[in-house]
Amino acid sequence: MQQNKVSAVILAGGASSRMGHNKALMKLGVKTMIEWVIDPLRDVFNEIIIITNNPEEYSFLEDVRFVDDCIRTISKNSLVGILTGLYQSTSPYVFVTACDMPFLNVQLLKYMVEFLGKEDILIPFIGGFYEPLHSIYGKNCISAIESQLRNQNYKIADFFNDVKVKKLSEEVVRRLDPKLKSFININTIEDFHKYLNQF
């Protein structure tokens, strides 16, 4: 496996406006949500980077690296998080996910790493939409992201025309993750209670 070619990056904001507190630290069964995110990543990636401006909240986590957003003036922005991960990674590529996606699938992650070629982005395309927070980005994306941020455009997919993108089809994804659980994110209290019994 090309483990050393790809590092994992988790975007971990602070207090959630919908939850009222840091959802990454909410307990789902015996573990916090961010631990459920990290565990499958450990099976695939040698380096795990957590992007947060509050690393002290995650002091209980081991064998991960904490970094601040590279642009602190833009609050909780995923595109800035992706750029930060690319800056900080010791690998040429990063797999980017969010702290509220606790159903990551090890087999799908391994497939994506193996399927990665010379493109700049490998991204699932599900139901006609990109899944930018379950995707692999290469360092060749840095200049395109920097340019877009200078124009104060924070929509992730808007820089895709400037780089080489490979889509991962829904058909392929469903072979490994039939119910597409990898892409579930827990954004609200209702989501939390809906999925709590699955842990």
Image (cartoon, rainbow, N blue to C red):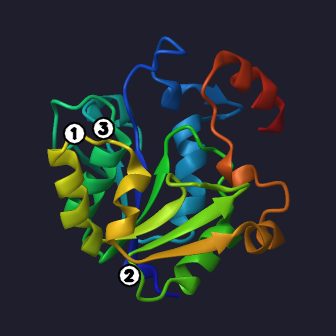
What is the C-alpha distance between the residues marked 2 and 3? 23 Å
Residues marked 2 and 3 touching at CB (< 8 Å): no
What is the C-alpha distance between the residues marked 3 and 1? 21 Å
Q: Is residue 76 above or below residue 115?
A: above
Q: Position of residue 127 (x, y in %)?
A: 73, 54
- Residue in the image at 76% along x and 21% along y: 193
Q: Is residue 169 above or below residue 97?
A: below
Q: Nearer the viewer, mark 3 or mark 1?
A: 1
**Which residue position is annotated with label 1?**
152
**Which residue position is annotated with label 3?**
52
10 Å crowding of disc 2: few (<14), some (14-19), many (20+): some
Disc 3 element: loop
Between 76 and 168, the one lying in front of the other is 168
> Quadrant where the C terminus lies?
top right
Q: Is residue 170 left or right of residue 149?
A: right
- Residue in the image at 28% along x and 42% along y: 153
**Which residue position is annotated with label 2?**
5
Residue 51 visible here: yes
Q: Position of residue 47 (x, y in %)?
A: 37, 66
- Residue in the image at 54% along x and 44% along y: 35
* Mark number, residue 42: none
Q: Is residue 193 above or below residue 10?
A: above
Q: Position of residue 138 (x, y in %)?
A: 34, 73
Q: Nearer the viewer, mark 2 or mark 1?
A: 1
Q: Is residue 69 left or right of residue 127?
A: left
